[in-house]
Image (cartoon, grey):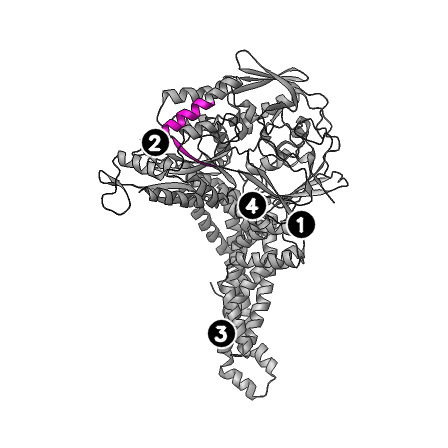
């Protein structure tokens, strides 16, 4: 197990280098950089050209792309993600607390999504074709179809503006965390409910479940111990993929709730053409994604010892 | 191999853990006075509050109304007054401007504001090592010379008439030299000025708290409160989304937010809110052409397009009626704007006139498909603009229909500003929809003096001479005359088609009192108060 984990962690290296290389190639193909964006719209381009040249030299942006790449990778190996051209702050400081905010939001959303989604899926499967099942699956279809930002605005209008129960903005307490995580969690629960339901239905029809029931086992034991354990495997796969999405793609929700996470920063960095920040975020997101999938793989073996960890 | 793997894993783990360390909020530990707090929305966190290092709108919006004060200000009637300078004198050769500073002004760290502080600021802007974006705005400024403790002289290589404008922006405000030296590269997070508010706390990406400067003395004639600010605190809340800001206004988490045509209806007519309009706009939206590429190289063709544009429809569709239809190549809020010239030489909506001019040029619809042709070329062109603002596509959609009505087809092309603006220099460009905000008539020189800001305006000795003179003529009356000449010549050549000048609008909680702005739309924050 330990050697497997270390081997998977080692895979991070080529993944990160590959990602850095691709982002560098994209960067090289784009005609503007953070410096020209910093001075964009200056009244006399001749004057700003002098200042631009000074900053480009300071950040090695006047060097060929390959040399820039070399500088960047060398810095990364020293644990330095570089300095933002726009804010002049270390990228690690810019990303740091935002990453923590994004993690908080991701895990709170995940908790809500899993509890609601898996719970609804199990009940729907058990009470197949009942009123509850039909209602739950219809609602989940709405959840799948509804744009996340739209649900976000509805939640704000209902809980903040109408009921005045929760604050609209901020990231200081659980009250601020509740709505954005509920927003993402509800969207996530829609897909989890449907997958859990179909997976459970498949398992509940299998012979070993019939055998367990025939042996007179307690129904709760049949469902939660024997059926759910096997039904969870595809659900865990989806959860693993969703964690990556939550960590890298929650920027719309972060913007709607003014939740200052890395998604929000990524959007700004792209607009600013501040590639040092963009690369830092991509690197951290990629590492998180790989680690999340590693955890999923390990969970696989915990749930089903027949699964062999190899790779 | 095993040791190598462990080493790499350790690096990644350390990097990951380091990334988890939250940034410490900047807390300057100032005493928070008793009194009311006013919360204002900003869409973006400033990257720094060192005005030598930034001229961005995000930083300007915070710095200009809190801790930075300037030498002069322009009031709502477009009259220049002294602020930190009591008076000034221009040398005979117009290359030197001497400012006589007000005495008794102190920075909030207790140090005196004096000629050394003014020189210190301009030295920092001119210092190549700072690569200050503000330097680009100061023309041919050579140096600042201290004549005595309260007299300082700015020396230019060429007369620089735009000085009165640039002295109003936040990058012309003064920082305490002692604080700049104390904090060095970190000064942008620990700014110290002479203004009515002092930075107390900054949670990056989230909020900035400013507290009242208890020793402040207001000298501006357009302010009503001569003493320290009436508010105890101003809080700037970073809220990127308009919809979220509107909800925060309704719940009372915000006291004020800038509005646009989409958000205004949400608060309009509601008793809980007041709306403040700053109509004296220094912004101009216009269509500009590649004047070196046929058929846009023909002024008559450009004029025909000018007559085809229904500005009133654009004002309604793109700004909900809250902007001014414009026929001059200069924003109406600027000194030198002359409405009569626009009415005489401009192109009011007249599609019949547009059709007639196009017919005269030989552009006719021969195949009956509604689109004109000439010498085998179809009148189908591209119009570029930028993303991120709802008024842009809405303006373009009206223009597209207006042009189609006279037999000209356009394809709308949008990209984000970073890609859009540099791309305008390419030879193949047809036309674009642009918007520019600037506080002085020399915006005409910057944009339209050949070869133009994007390189598509052919040399024109007569026009260029007038535009050059606008930059170097310090005499106020002469400059007004030049502005009139430039507007007339630009309309005669129809280098651009002016469209509209948008207003700045704020939604205010009903209990906010004495909210008012100056010539540039900057809030005079010391006058604000909240009625209980």
Residue B215 x, y percent position in the rendering: 75, 30
The residue carrying pointer 1 sits among few (fewer than 14), some (14 to 19) or many (20 or more) residues within 10 Å by Cα, namely: some
Q: Nearer the viewer, residue B274 or B453?
A: B274
Q: State the extent of the magenta-drawn residues as a range.
A: B483-502
Residue beneath label 1, please?
A: B252
Residue beneath label 4, please?
A: A79
Spatial separation of the CA atoms under disc 4 and disc 3 = 45 Å
**Chain hosting mark 2:** B
Residue beneath label 3, please?
A: A198
Is residue B497 highlighted in magenta?
yes
Quadrant assignment, res B418:
top left
**Chain hosting mark 1:** B
Residue beneath label 2, please?
A: B291
Residue B79 x, y percent position in the rendering: 59, 24
Tags 4 and 2 in contact by the CB under 8 Å rule? no
Is residue B226 highlighted in magenta?
no
């Amino acid at each position: 197990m330990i050697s497997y984990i270390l081997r998977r962690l080692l895979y991070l290296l080529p993944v990160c280098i590959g990602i850095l290389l691709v982002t560098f190639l994209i960067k090289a193909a784009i005609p503007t950089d953070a410096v020209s964006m910093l001075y964009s719209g200056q009244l006399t381009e001749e004057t700003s050209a002098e200042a631009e040249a000074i900053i480009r030299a300071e950040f090695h942006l006047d060097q060929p792309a390959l040399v820039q790449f070399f500088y960047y990778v060398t810095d990364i190996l020293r644990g330095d993600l570089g300095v933002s051209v726009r804010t002049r702050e270390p990228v690690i400081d810019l990303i740091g607390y935002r990453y923590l905010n994004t993690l908080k939001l991701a895990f709170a959303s995940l908790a809500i999504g899993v509890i609601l989604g898996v719970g609804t899926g199990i009940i729907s499967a058990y009470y197949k074709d009942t009123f509850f099942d039909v209602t739950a699956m219809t609602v989940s279809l709405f959840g799948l179809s509804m744009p996340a930002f739209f649900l976000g605005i509805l939640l704000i209008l209902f809980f903040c503006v109408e009921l005045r129960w929760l604050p609209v903005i901020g990231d200081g307490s659980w009250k601020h965390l509740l709505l954005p995580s509920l927003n993402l969690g509800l969207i996530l629960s829609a897909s989890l409910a449907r997958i859990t339901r179909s997976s459970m239905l498949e398992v509940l029809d299998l012979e070993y479940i019939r055998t367990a029931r025939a042996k007179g086992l307690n129904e709760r034991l049949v469902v939660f111990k024997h059926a759910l354990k096997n039904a969870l495997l595809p659900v865990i796969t989806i959860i693993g993929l969703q964690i990556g999405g939550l960590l890298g793609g929650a920027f719309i929700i972060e913007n709607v709730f003014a939740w200052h996470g890395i998604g929000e920063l990524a959007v700004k960095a792209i607009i600013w053409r501040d590639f040092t920040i963009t690369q830092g975020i991509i690197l951290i997101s990629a590492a998180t994604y790989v680690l999340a999938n590693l955890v999923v793989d390990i969970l696989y073996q915990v749930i089903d010892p027949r699964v062999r960890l190899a790779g | 191999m095993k040791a190598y793997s462990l080493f790499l894993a350790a690096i990644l783990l350390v990097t990951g853990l380091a990334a988890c360390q939250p940034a410490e909020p900047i807390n300057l530990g100032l005493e928070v006075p008793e009194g009311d707090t006013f919360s204002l929305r900003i869409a973006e966190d400033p990257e720094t509050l060192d005005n030598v290092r930034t001229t961005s709108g995000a930083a300007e919006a915070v710095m200009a109304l809190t801790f930075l004060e300037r030498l002069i200000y322009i009031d709502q009637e477009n009259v220049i007054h002294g602020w930190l300078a009591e008076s000034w004198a221009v040398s005979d050769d117009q290359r030197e401007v001497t400012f006589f500073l007000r005495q008794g002004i102190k920075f909030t760290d207790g140090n005196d504001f004096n000629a050394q502080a003014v020189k210190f600021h301009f030295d920092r802007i001119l210092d190549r090592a700072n690569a200050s974006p503000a330097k680009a705005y100061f023309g041919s400024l050579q140096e600042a010379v201290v004549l005595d403790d309260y007299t300082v002289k700015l020396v230019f290589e060429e007369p620089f008439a735009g000085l009165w404008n640039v002295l109003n922006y936040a990058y012309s405000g003064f920082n305490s030299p002692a604080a700049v030296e104390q904090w060095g590269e970190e000064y942008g997070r620990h700014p110290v000025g002479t203004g009515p508010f002092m930075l107390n706390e900054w949670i990056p990406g989230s909020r900035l708290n400013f507290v009242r400067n208890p020793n402040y003395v207001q000298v501006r004639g357009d302010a009503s409160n001569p003493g320290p600010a009436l508010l105890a605190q101003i809080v700037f809340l970073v809220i990127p989304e308009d919809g979220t800001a509107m909800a925060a206004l309704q719940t009372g988490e915000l006291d004020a937010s800038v509005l646009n045509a989409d958000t205004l209806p949400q608060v309009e007519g509601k008793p809980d809110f007041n709306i403040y309009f700053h109509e004296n706009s220094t912004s101009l939206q216009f269509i500009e052409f590649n004047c070196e590429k046929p058929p846009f190289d023909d002024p008559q063709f450009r004029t025909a397009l000018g007559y085809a544009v229904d500005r009133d429809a654009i004002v309604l569709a793109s700004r909900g009626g809250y902007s001014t239809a414009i026929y001059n190549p200069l924003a109406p809020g600027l000194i030198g704007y002359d409405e009569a010239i626009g009415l005489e030489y401009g192109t009011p909506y007249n599609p019949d006139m547009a059709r007639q001019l196009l017919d005269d040029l030989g552009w006719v619809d021969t195949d009956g498909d509604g689109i004109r042709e000439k010498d085998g070329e179809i009148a189908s062109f591209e119009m570029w603009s930028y993303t991120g603002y709802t008024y842009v596509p809405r303006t373009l959609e009206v223009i597209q229909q207006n042009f189609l009505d006279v037999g000209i087809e356009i394809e709308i092309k949008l990209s984000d500003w970073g890609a859009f603006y540099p791309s305008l220099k390419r030879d193949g460009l047809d036309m674009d929809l642009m918007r520019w905000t600037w506080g002085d008539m020399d915006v005409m020189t910057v944009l339209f003096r050949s070869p133009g800001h994007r390189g598509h305006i052919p040399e024109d000795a007569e026009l260029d001479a007038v535009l050059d003179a606008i930059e170097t003529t310090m005499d106020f009356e002469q400059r007004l005359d030049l502005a009139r000449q430039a507007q007339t010549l630009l309309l005669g050549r129809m280098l651009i088609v002016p469209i509209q000048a948008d207003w700045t609008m704020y939604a205010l909680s009903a209990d906010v009192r004495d909210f008012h702005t100056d010539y540039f739309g900057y809030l005079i924050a010391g006058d604000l108060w909240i009625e209980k």
